[in-house]
Amino acid sequence: MLLVIDVGNTETKLGCFNDGAQTLVHHWRVTTESRRTADEYGVFFTQLFATAGVRSREIDAVAIASVVPRLDHTLVDVCEKFFSLTPRMLEAQRQRLIAVKTDRPEEVGADLIATAIGGRERHGVPLILVSYGTATVFMAISAQADYLGVAIAPGINISIDALIGRTAKLPQIALDAPAHTIGRNTIEALQSGIIYGFVGQTEAIVARIRAEMGVEAAVVATGGLAEVVAKHTTIFNAVDPHLSLYGLRAFARD
């Protein structure tokens, strides 16, 4: 069984693919904690797997994409100690699956490359991926399957935290859109501005990226908050929340 781990600044996503590495049979989303030791992570992963009936000895390969350098050595230690495996670490400038056409490929996060590879594998090209996580990231992949670059905006939760944190009387809200764009109370007003604001941002930036690419590229939403926006716009051809895990699967098989 293949274990893939996508380490983000806020959350870490894990997935297990079956022995043929075709089907994502289990997946989890946990808080990234850079202060955990290798032993703590090892016990935590083992307990997490146990809830799904996965035994550590079933893991025969591991691939990792990390944007938290402090955890890289820790996770290598976890794999070696608990799975007796050396993981493959995805790096933008060293992987061979997608050409990175940015000015500084070494600056591109491994999580974005994993997502781009997964998007290309599952949805073809040309393609625009919109990843809703800590940040909202718009990725452009050309008809030649080149990673062209991105636009990055503050994520949904970051925006809410910033607004609530600077305005003492505003309440915490659920990420649900109100029936009316014109809010009739404080909660509706916040929900309208946040949800429809991100919908408008998505539609506007996608339109600009398509114009610059010169093609009517397909658009796919991914990430943990993809559905929050996707259900209020028709711009997406698909919602595929686990693209980074599929990208790591392709990297592990390369």
Image (tube, helix red, strand yellow):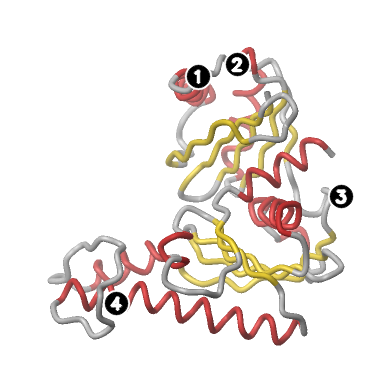
Q: Nearer the viewer, mark 2 or mark 4?
A: 4
Q: Nearer the viewer, mark 2 or mark 1?
A: 1
* Residues at circles 3 and 2 in contact by the CB criterion of under 8 Å: no
Which residue position holds label 4? 192
Q: Which mark is residue 46?
A: 1
217 with respect to 142 (left or right):
left
In this rendering, the answer to whether 29 lies above or below 100 is: above
* Residues at circles 2 and 1 in contact by the CB criterion of under 8 Å: yes
Which residue position holds label 2? 82
* Residues at circles 3 and 4 in contact by the CB criterion of under 8 Å: no
Residue type, label 3? Arg
SS under mark 3: loop
Q: Which mark is residue 91?
A: none
Decide which of 239, 129 is in the foreground and name it: 239
Which residue position holds label 3? 96
Quadrant location of the N terminus in the rendered image: top right
Residue 39, position in %: x, y?
Answer: 51, 20
* Residues at circles 1 and 3 in contact by the CB criterion of under 8 Å: no
Residue type, label 2? Phe
Q: CA distance from mark 4 to mark 1?
A: 42 Å
Residue type, label 4? Ser
In this rendering, the answer to whether 153 lies above or below 214 is: above
Q: Earlier in the sequence, mark 2 or mark 4?
A: 2
SS under mark 2: helix
SS under mark 4: helix
